[in-house]
Amino acid sequence: MRTLSLFIAMSLDGYIAKPNDDLSFLELVEKEGEDYGYAEFTANIDTIILGRKTYDWVLKEIGTSHYDNGERDVYVITRNERPNVGRTTFYTGDLHDLVQQLKKGTGKNIYCDGGAEVINELLKNDLIDEFIISIIPVLVGSGTRLFKDHRPEQLLELISAKTFDTGLAQLHYRRKK
């Protein structure tokens, strides 16, 4: 069965964005030639699931090529129907059903690229198999929390912990079965 992984960065106090979807704190750890394992991670995925707000932000800030590179299926979870673009599907159905269908399919692994609403819906249904969380050395104080309240307890197994000279710490956990 395919694995669904979360690969994300957050502040030390647990925020993936400051108010108004401000991600500027990520710049604190930008370093020429350092991708914190992202290229290695994405080499093993062929499907991406993400929320519409995250998708729109990436398109505006990075461009369409970040997702629509012809090599991956992209599912944008949205409430509003939109026509598909290339291998990008704007999905309005049940997220649990989609993930179950994808996990049973063939191919490489599945990557959840955010945002918080999608992540927490996946957590409520115990659908995330692997967590790779990079902790940025900053306390931002408020914004969008990675982990929201009112979800089931989940036990995790530590796979690795890495530190980088930028102060970033990366934790890799796998869900205990």
Image: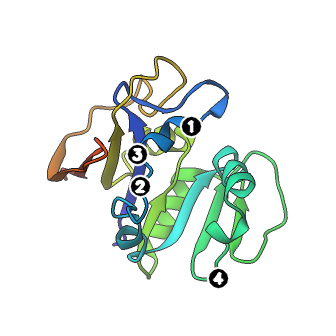
- Write the residue at 38% across / 58% down: 5
Instruction: For marks 2 and 3, give the CA distance.
Output: 6 Å
Q: Which quadrant of the structure image shows residue 43? A: bottom left
- Answer with mark 4 or mark 3, whichever residue precedes in sequence: 3
Which quadrant holds the N terminus?
bottom left
**Kind of element beneath mark 4:** loop
Which mark lies nearer to you, 2 or 4? 2
**Kind of element beneath mark 3:** helix
Which mark lies nearer to you, 4 or 3? 3
For disc 3, the neighbor class at 10 Å (few under 14, some 14 to 19, many from 20) is some
**Amino acid under label 3?**
Val
User: Which residue lies under the disc numbered 4?
Assistant: 70
**Amino acid under label 4?**
Gly
- Vertical comparison of 25 with 36: above or below: above
Q: Looking at the image, do the residues carrying marks 2 and 3 touch, with CB atoms under 8 Å apart?
A: yes
User: Which residue lies under the disc numbered 2?
Assistant: 31
